[in-house]
Image (tube, coloured by chain):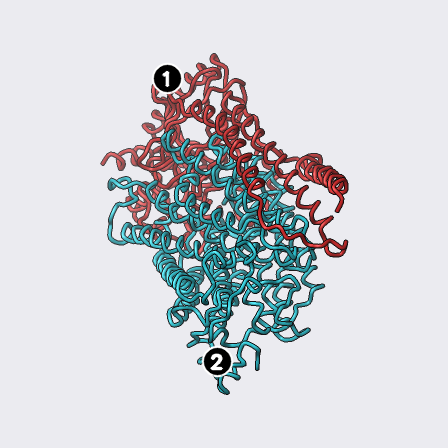
Chain colours: A cyan, B red
């Protein structure tokens, strides 16, 4: 694989040097591209495992009455679905993107800490084997919700400690991944790649990594206190022993709110790469995008209690958390306006990545609106813990994070595989997804407003119509995602050869290396000038 | 691109998106039985909450239509296939200041009424009547603090039978399926009712949408809330915080009566209390115990141990041929009264009357093929309780 960037190297470097044999290539891998692939494949597998659980949930809720499962098993499904999707699908998928793209975008030969990179991935399959194995234990998997509120979570059977230990391992993996991202971005940038020349995806990941390092230990602390309450008779959260069950909620959401931004900031980054490419116009307001991301990250630390307005807080705290939460809509609004301004007077084409990115902008904004509504405390007294909330966070997580992941996959897939995916099928995948995801989640707004609590296995017949509609949308959306696997699989196996540039309007260092990106890239740092930098023209 | 052209397309897009928004938000109302919107409720507070909800919803709708209209105008006009050539601009400080300032102003406009309503909602001072609400897995208990009235409220038996997996009972044939209880909480209209809300085991949340709020019930802590209902009526709600297996099956039914009817109800409750006490003292016949026991079993036990007494392996043991239901009476009483550590079996001593426990025990020892012949009297349970 002789390439222009490799011309100056000696004879040995003309080969990929991929290690031979499965064990050497994948299990012992220290290569950022291979580890990125591992993360992405793992995340896709988890997406389908979590998705299968969602199908069971929607099947039971298809009509009133309990037809398929016991309420206890239903609760296990909602709990494990959330844990798998959050920690198994969305977070690892973004880490996969970080691994693949950050070194390519900043002109680094690899991640700064390759062996730790290997370890942080290989913890995941073990952690999730343990978590999913709890489904087969006596008494079943944890059923107290992914938020793990005591005292309910302490009623979990034998599986309790396995789930808690799995969460500890996921935390360790995330922290190591975050350290690696920070070390790479701060130390490994090619000369000339100043911080304010970095692509926005790199910026959002840098900020996300700091969020991860700040909050994963907080979750670990909360989980450890649960473990000691259960096994060593401490009373952190046990009122009878002088503890406070609400304390757990404060600690959990001090982790949990930044966590939701951990799942959306890199998505903002991906969208900010894709829209300029297909609008053939530089990103509007690059600097304000960076500041907006940083402001959102900062605000994420001081709004946690808006997840618990009904828990019985003092009036002053409720007013403060309401106002602080409303403020988040300002930097988030700046982002949406800047994306539209990027499109304005561009020269747009609508390949699959762009379609998913546009879907993201519209549907994430709808999720943002319902988020703003939820911030209004008196209204939240009605919305809280209803399907309105379920609709809200699925709009920001599925049509937000997951759509961005789909967009990013289509965008960089030719770079990863060296082949173009099937554009026709990709468009079908988008249009079916965007229709059915709305059939799935939009009616849930109505269910919540009409008074249906979340996490119930059965409901009053007055909620029947919208639940059936939502289930139909769910099954169709689930089936549609099989297309995604097929398209990615076909693209990996072959197809039209991709150029280095891939997209007409693409800018940035990753497009200067050939497609597929060779096993080693940027062994000598590239020369950075404004013509190859995605946002160079802002200076 | 000509300016007029942009304006024209912009207006067309605004109109189109407004139509789509209407179709999504309003049209489904003609196709379904369910409500599409939050209830206005029956109190001044719930009305205020509804108004806030509508203001913020309208703000979001208007912003949404404008933003999406701008976006789709661009998608329509600025496409390569129409020969659009990309402009070069990268930022505009003026535009950015405008679209930061306007949202701030909107938020301030929104924050003021929200805060005022919130302050009113949190004013728990000077209630006329105080009711303590306690959440249990999976029922509610209501204590009328000044009236010496106290009772439990659980899912009604017909709903409870229909909701079992594989019951084959059509939920639409059950009145108020999953939203009906055996004992309603009753309040008078026009009075300020103060609620003290807590829980006995895990966190629950007490929610009647018509009152306009929900409040978590946290074990070890007492939360306050209040309401003043304006209209006579029956208002239904549910537990809103995941509390385990029965979370979907602990509804709330609140009945608001006129002041006279409420006074009558109080008298009835007090005389019923006296009857319950008398029931504990007298000797029951086997027929009486078996009949009552069957009813109590269906209401309290069948959810786990199943109507046919065959249980559900592995968590819920069968009653038929069970060593406890066929063995020592005092051990059987102990397990039912105090629960069984490390299993799902809960303690019933606080939630059932002595007569109910005696009847349920007698029934399980003489049904499903169990033939102990034992009769357990309410007095025995009372003695066990005190001893």
Which residue is the extreme one toward the left? B387
> Image check: A279 left or right of B135?
right
Q: How far across and down, in percent of the image, does residue B72 sit?
A: 69, 46
Indicate which disc residue B126 carries.
1
Chain under callout 1: B
Q: How far across and down, in percent of the image, does residue A134 sit?
A: 42, 60
- Residue where numbered disc 2 is placed: A22
Task: From the viewer's side, name the closer residue of A410 and A534.
Answer: A534
Residue drawn at (54%, 31%), measured in percent from left and top?
A: B106
Residue drawn at (48%, 65%), measured in percent from left and top?
A: A106
Q: How far across and down, in percent of the image, does residue A411 sit?
A: 60, 63
**Which element carries disc 1, helix, strand or loop?**
loop
Q: Is residue A404 visible?
A: yes
> Image check: A431 left or right of A330?
right
- Which part of the image, by quadrant, shows the C terminus of chain B? top left
Chain under callout 2: A
Q: How far across and down, in percent of the image, does residue A313 sit?
A: 37, 33
């Amino acid at each position: 694989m002789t390439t222009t960037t490799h011309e100056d190297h000696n004879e040995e470097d003309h080969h990929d040097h991929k290690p031979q044999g499965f064990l050497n290539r994948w299990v012992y891998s220290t290569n950022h591209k291979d580890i990125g692939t591992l993360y992405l494949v793992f995340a896709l597998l988890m997406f389908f495992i979590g998705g299968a659980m969602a199908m069971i949930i929607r099947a039971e809720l298809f009509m009133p009455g309990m037809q398929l499962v016991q309420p206890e098993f239903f609760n296990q499904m909602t709990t494990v679905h959330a844990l798998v999707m959050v920690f198994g699908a969305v977070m690892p998928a973004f880490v996969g993107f970080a691994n693949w793209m950050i070194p390519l975008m900043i002109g680094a030969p690899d991640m700064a800490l390759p062996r730790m990179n290997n370890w942080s991935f290989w913890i995941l399959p073990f952690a999730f084997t343990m978590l999913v194995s709890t489904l087969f234990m006596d008494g079943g998997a944890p059923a107290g919700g992914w938020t793990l509120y005591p005292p309910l979570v302490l009623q979990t059977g034998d599986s309790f400690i396995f789930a808690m230990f799995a969460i500890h391992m996921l935390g360790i993996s995330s922290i190591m991944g975050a350290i690696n991202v920070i070390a790479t971005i701060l130390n490994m940038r090619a000369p000339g790649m100043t911080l304010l020349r970095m692509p926005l995806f790199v910026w959002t990941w840098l900020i996300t990594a700091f969020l991860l390092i700040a909050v994963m230990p907080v979750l670990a602390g909360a989980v450890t206190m649960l473990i000691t309450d259960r096994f060593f008779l401490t009373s952190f959260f046990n009122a009878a022993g002088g503890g406070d069950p609400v304390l757990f909620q404060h600690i959990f959401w001090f982790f949990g709110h930044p966590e939701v931004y951990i799942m959306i900031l890199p998505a903002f980054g991906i969208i900010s790469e894709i829209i300029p490419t297909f609008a053939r116009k530089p990103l509007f307001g690059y600097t304000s995008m960076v500041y907006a991301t940083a402001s959102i990250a900062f605000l994420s630390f001081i709004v946690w209690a808006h997840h618990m307005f009904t828990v019985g807080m003092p009036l002053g705290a409720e007013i403060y958390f309401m106002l602080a939460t409303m403020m988040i809509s300002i930097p988030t609004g700046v982002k949406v306006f800047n994306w539209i301004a990027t499109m304005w007077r561009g020269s747009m084409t609508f390949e699959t990545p762009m379609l998913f990115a546009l879907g993201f902008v519209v549907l994430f904004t709808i999720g943002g609106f319902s988020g703003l509504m939820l911030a209004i405390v008196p209204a939240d007294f009605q919305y809280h813990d209803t399907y309105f909330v379920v609709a809200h966070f699925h709009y920001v997580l599925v049509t937000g994070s997951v759509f961005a992941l789909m967009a990013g996959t289509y965008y960089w897939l030719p770079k990863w595989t060296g082949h173009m995916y099937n554009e026709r099928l990709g468009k079908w995948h988008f249009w079916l997804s965007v229709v059915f995801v709305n059939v799935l989640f939009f009616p849930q707004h109505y269910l919540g407003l009409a008074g249906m609590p979340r996490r119930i296995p059965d409901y009053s017949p007055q909620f029947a119509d919208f639940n059936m509609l939502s289930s139909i949308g769910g099954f169709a959306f689930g089936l549609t995602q099989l297309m995604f696997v097929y398209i990615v699989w076909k693209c990996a196996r072959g197809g039209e050869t991709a150029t280095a540039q891939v997209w007409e309007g693409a800018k940035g260092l990753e497009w200067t290396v050939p497609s597929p990106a060779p096993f080693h890239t940027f062994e000598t740092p590239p020369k950075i000038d404004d013509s190859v930098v995605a946002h160079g023209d802002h200076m | 691109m000509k300016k007029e052209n942009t304006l024209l397309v912009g207006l067309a897009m605004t109109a189109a998106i407004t139509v789509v928004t209407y179709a999504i938000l309003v049209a489904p109302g003609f196709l379904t039985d369910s409500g599409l919107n939050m209830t206005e409720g029956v109190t001044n507070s719930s009305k205020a909450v509804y108004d806030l909800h509508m203001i913020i919803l309208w703000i979001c709708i208007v912003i949404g239509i404008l933003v999406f209209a701008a976006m789709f105008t661009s998608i329509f006009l600025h496409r390569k296939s129409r020969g659009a050539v990309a402009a070069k601009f990268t930022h505009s400080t003026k535009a950015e200041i405008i679209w930061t300032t306007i949202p701030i102003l909107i938020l301030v406009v929104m924050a003021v009424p929200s805060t005022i309503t919130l302050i009113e909602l949190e004013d728990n001072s000077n209630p006329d009547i105080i009711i303590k609400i306690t959440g249990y897995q999976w029922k509610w208990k209501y204590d009328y603090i000044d009236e010496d009235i106290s009772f439990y409220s659980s899912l009604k038996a017909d709903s409870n039978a229909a909701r079992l997996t594989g019951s084959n009972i059509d939920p639409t044939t059950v009145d108020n399926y999953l939203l009906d209880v055996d004992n309603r909480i009753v309040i008078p209209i026009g009075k300020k009712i103060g609620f003290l809300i807590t829980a006995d085991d895990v966190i629950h949340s007490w929610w009647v949408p018509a009152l306009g709020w929900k409040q978590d019930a946290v074990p070890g802590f007492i939360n306050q809330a209040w309401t003043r209902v304006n209209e006579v009526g029956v208002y239904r709600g549910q537990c809103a915080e995941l509390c385990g297996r029965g979370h979907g099956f602990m509804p709330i039914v609140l009945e608001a009566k006129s002041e006279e009817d409420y006074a009558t109800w109080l008298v009835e409750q007090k005389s019923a209390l006296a009857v319950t006490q008398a029931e504990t003292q007298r000797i029951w016949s086997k027929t009486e115990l078996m009949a009552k026991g069957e009813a109590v079993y269906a209401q309290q036990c069948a959810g786990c141990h199943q109507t046919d007494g065959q249980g559900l392996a592995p968590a819920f043991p069968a009653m038929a041929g069970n060593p406890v239901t066929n063995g020592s009476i005092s051990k059987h009483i102990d397990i039912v009264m105090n629960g069984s550590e490390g299993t799902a079996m809960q303690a019933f001593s606080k939630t059932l009357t002595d007569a109910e426990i005696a009847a349920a025990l007698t029934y399980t020892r003489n049904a499903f093929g169990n033939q102990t012949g034992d009769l357990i009297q309410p007095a025995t349970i009372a003695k066990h309780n005190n001893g």
